[in-house]
Amino acid sequence: MQKQGLLTDVIDALCCLPGVGPKSAQRMALHLFQRDRGGADNLAKALQVAADKLGNCKKCRTLTEYELCSICASPTRDQHLVCVVESPADVWVINQATDYQGMFFVLNGRLSPLDGIGPDEIGIDQLEQQLAVNQVTELILATNSTVEGEATAHFIAQLALANHVQVSRLAHGVPVGGELEFIDSSTLAHAFSGRRSIE
C-alpha cells in the first residue's frame, strides 16, 4: 500500500475547517505551495503558536492567550451587564456590529441532552457564581434561535430570575430590508410576539 504524501496530509488537515470540502482544501493547499510559500510559513507558525497558547478566559470563557481576555480586563466595560452567547464567534459579531459595552459569558455550546451536553458542560455553575457575586443587574440572552438555543435561554432565564437578575432576550424577527412575503412563518411569528410600541 502506497504511503500518503505530504500534500495529501495538508489537504486532509484543511478539511477540518467548517465549509471546506476536499476540492476547496486542494485549491488552498496548491495555492500555498505553488504561489505563496511565505504565506504557508506564516500560516503554519501562527497556527502553532495559537494552538500552544490559546485557552479560555477565566471569567467569560472566550478564547484568549491571557488569563483574562481584553473585554474582561477592560476597566471601561459595564460589569453589571452580561450578554450570554454560545460561542466566541458571537462575541466578535456583537462587538463589531453593535455599541454594546457590557461583559460576556460564552457557553461554548448549548444544552443538548441527546448529545450528552448538560448544564455542567456549558459552564452554568460558573455563570451562577458570577450572578451571585458580581452584582449583575441584567442578563442578555443571545443564544441562537434553534430548539436547543431556545431551551438553553429558558434554562438560564430561570436561573437568573432565581438570583433576582433582570433577564432580556435578543429580538428575533423581520430583517432590515426583508419583505414579508419571503419571511418564513416561524420568523414572522417571533416578530409578532416580540413587537413593541412606537414612541
Image: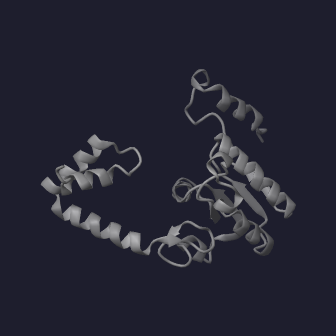
Q: Is residue 80 visible?
A: no
Q: Residue furthest front?
A: 1
Foreground of the two, 104 or 12:
12
Quarter holding residue 53: bottom left
Q: For this view, does 192 lie left or right of residue 181? A: right
Q: Position of residue 145 (x, y in %)?
A: 65, 42
Give the x, y percent position of residue 43: 28, 64
Give above or below for 80 relative to 94.
below
Q: In this rendering, is residue 54 above or below 155?
A: below
The answer to whether residue 20 is visible is: yes
- The residue that appears at 55% across and 55% down in the rendered structure is 90
Image quarter (top left, top right, bottom left or bottom right) of the C terminus:
top right
Is 125 in front, or is 164? Answer: 125
In the rendered image, which quarter is residue 148 located in? top right
Residue ID at (64%, 54%): 117
Total marks shown come to 0
Give the image's coloring scheme: one colour
Residue 30: give x, y in percent of width and height. Answer: 18, 50
Kindly give the residue lying farthest to the top in the view shown. Answer: 181
Image coordinates for residue 160, horizontal then vertical, percent: 80, 60
Q: Is residue 167 above or below residue 77?
A: above
- Residue drawn at 56 percent across, 59 percent down: 91
Relative height, residue 194 to residue 64 (above, below):
above
In this picture, residue 95 sits left or right of residue 40: right
